[in-house]
Image (cartoon, rainbow, N blue to C red):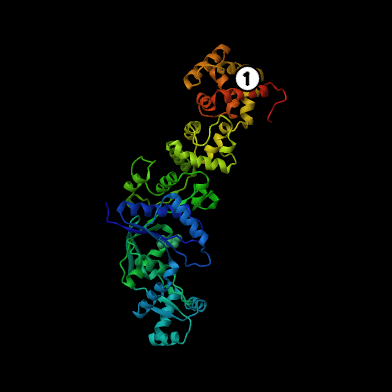
Amino acid sequence: MPDPMRLRFPPSPTGYLHVGGARTALFNWLLARQSGGALVLRIEDTDRDRSSEAHTQAILDGMEWLGLDWDEGPTFQSDGVERHREAALRLLAEGRAYRDFTDPAALREEAAERGIGHPSVLAREKAEALGVEGAERRAAAGEPHAIRLRVPEGDTRWHDLVHGPMSFPNADIDDFVILRSDGSPVYNLAVVCDDAHQHITHVVRGDDHLSNTPKQILLYEALGLPVPVFGHVPMILGPDGKRLSKRHGATAVGDYAGEGILPDAMVNFLALLGWNPGDEREVMGRDELIESFSMDRVQKKSAVFDTEKLGWFNGQYLAALPSAELEPLFVERLEARGIGPAHWAEGAGSAGSAEIHRLLDLLKVRARTVEDLARQAEPYLLDDVAFDEGAVAKHWLRDREGAAERLDAVAGALADGPWEEGALETRLRACAEALGVGAGKVIHPLRVALTGQAHSPGIFEVLVVLGRHRALRRIERALSLVRDPDFSLS
Ligand code: GLU
């Protein structure tokens, strides 16, 4: 087991918890749990205009729904502004940063005119010409100015947990502003100060932050702070190879919760976005993920967010969930569809009943989401079955007389005798034989009569779940529809 690691998840509350953020949070959580360390949740709310409490709450809700608990926080970056500012002033006092009184637009213009690659080169030149005393005098007189880091010569290197050895020439990094003229610290300074303040040992975040890392390392070094270990995890793309966005469908974790995805399935799916256990395993519970996760197996190339695959994972988790645990989620979905327990037909069972658990056992192996499950359960819970037009056309109307004859024979075969799968199968097969047709010819019209659909779980199981009385009533109704020459759905 690695030494206890201190990790962080520092979302900016400018939107909901996005699947990319959730995946980053998950990787950090897995490392914290695996190493017996800690996960710090820090809300990076310094962009006052774009941050909101509602978004902060949505992020916390998303983390809770996923079951990603944190050990410290939430702390708020805006609470540390004074500390960030002090760090900038300390760098200034030590000569590692300088005051820049130039007007940014004028600086850009002059740099362009003189063919100077980056305006900060000019800013440094002017600061040097002014001298520290001159700068202090102008600052004391209240003249507005920014503070820039004096980037040293050389290269900035680190060993990335995903990308391996990384090196950036400092010549490519300008003397960047660390404190703006309005006194506000820039993002890179705030992050470094907070990560150091919170004793973060490992910074695991998205590749989109790769270009910030050399600047942050320069700041750690200038401030004399220990540099954490960095690992940059790959971006998440949509199936078309473009960066995942709303165009690809839901991107907020909360949307998936609303669609009936189970948190365990989401966690499993997210863990495999950019990581794999090195063998064929796919369905992996939390404990297994904690045990198996390693940054060594995080891939460099982007990961593809495939909602089909998420549906598949969810199907696996639904099927494995004991029906008693599934029931509350199921009932919640039904209520959202306006068909809660109060609307269930007589004989369908009541909340918590064996009938409902049997129904869930029957349906859960075929459903991909709880929403699916609720939809599929409708014909069993309500007596008013909605008929699928194609199913009716094919199995009832194409040969009305034949269908009526077969349904009538089925009604006779089901009128008495034991009501369990094996016995029902024997009676239905005997019935088909007596009619001189294949079993399918009997089963298809019956399925439409019972469920309204051309597809359903095994017909004998369906019969058991419905019970004799409700099944016979449906067959009778089917018969009257099939025999009615005016009946058609088209
Ligand atoms: N607040 C940053 C973001 O949401 C994260 C910064 C980091 O991980 O260092 O992208």
Is 284 positioned to the left or the right of 250 in the image?
left
Residue type pointed to by label 1? Ala
Residue drawn where x is 39% and y is 53% of the image: 69
Please count the marks in the image: 1
Where is residue 81 drawn, in percent x and y? Answer: 43, 72
Q: Residues within 10 Å of mark 1 (few under 14, many from 20)?
A: many
Judge by depth and name the residue closer to the eye, 188 or 77.
77
Above or below 341: residue 178:
below
| Quadrant assignment, res 131 | bottom left
The CB of the residue at mark 1 lies under 8 Å from ligand 1: no
Q: Work out which quarter of the rendered image holds the C terminus and state it.
A: top right
Where is residue 77 drawn, in percent x and y? Answer: 43, 66
The residue at which mark 1 appears reads as 403
Judge by depth and name the residue closer to the eye, 469 or 199.
469
| Quadrant assignment, res 193 | bottom left
Judge by depth and name the residue closer to the eye, 468 or 270.
468
Where is residue 246 drawn, in percent x and y? Answer: 54, 52
Where is residue 458 drawn, in percent x and y? Answer: 50, 26
Above or below 439: residue 87:
below
Asked whether residue 65 appears in the rendered view, the answer is: yes
Residue farthest along the right direction in this orientation: 486
Residue drawn where x is 51% and y is 29% of the image: 457
- Helix, strand or loop under label 1: helix
Is 314 positioned to the left or the right of 7 in the image?
right
Residue drawn where x is 43% and y is 69% of the image: 79
